[in-house]
Amino acid sequence: MKKLTKTAIALFGATTLGFAGFGAYAFADNFWQGHNNMVQINNDLDQLSQTIKNKNDQLTKAKSDLADAQNKLKDAQSSQS
């Protein structure tokens, strides 16, 4: 009887550890999938940030060019007067 109880406890323990190991594997697999998604999102955000920075730089240059053109126009108009 004692041998049967010990065998049953050992079998139950091994089964429990097996399910726990499978659960840990599934958790780790899902965790790493989420990690890859986070890395991809961060890369996308970096690209968007760079695009916005480039557009802001272009806008600043365009505003500067417009101000220069307006000054040249004023100078030309005042020289005609």
Image (tube, grey):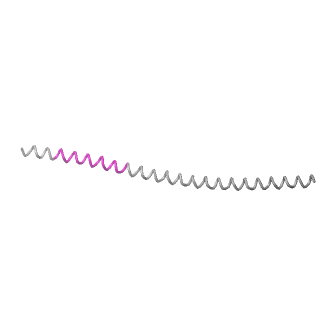
* Residue most extreme to the front: 1
Is 19 placed left or right of 57 in the picture? right
Q: State the image coordinates of residue 67 (x, y, percent, origin top left).
A: 22, 45
Is 56 placed left or right of 45 in the picture? left
Is 44 placed left or right of 36 in the picture? left
Residue 59 forms part of the magenta stretch: yes
Q: State the image coordinates of residue 43 (x, y, percent, origin top left).
A: 48, 53
Residue 29 forms part of the magenta stretch: no
Magenta span of residues = 53-72
Pick the residue in front: 46 or 1. Answer: 1
Pick the residue in front: 41 or 63. Answer: 41
* Residue most extreme to the right: 1
Residue plotted at (13% across, 44% down): 75
Q: Specify the principal SS of the magenta part.
A: helix
Quarter of the image where the C terminus is located: top left
Is 4 placed left or right of 31 in the picture? right
Residue plotted at (46% across, 53% down): 44
Pick the residue in front: 20 or 71. Answer: 20
Q: State the image coordinates of residue 17 (x, y, percent, origin top left).
A: 76, 53
Q: State the image coordinates of residue 3 (x, y, percent, origin top left).
A: 92, 54
Quarter of the image where the N terminus is located: bottom right
How many numbered tags mark residues here?
A: 0
Residue plotted at (21% across, 46% down): 68
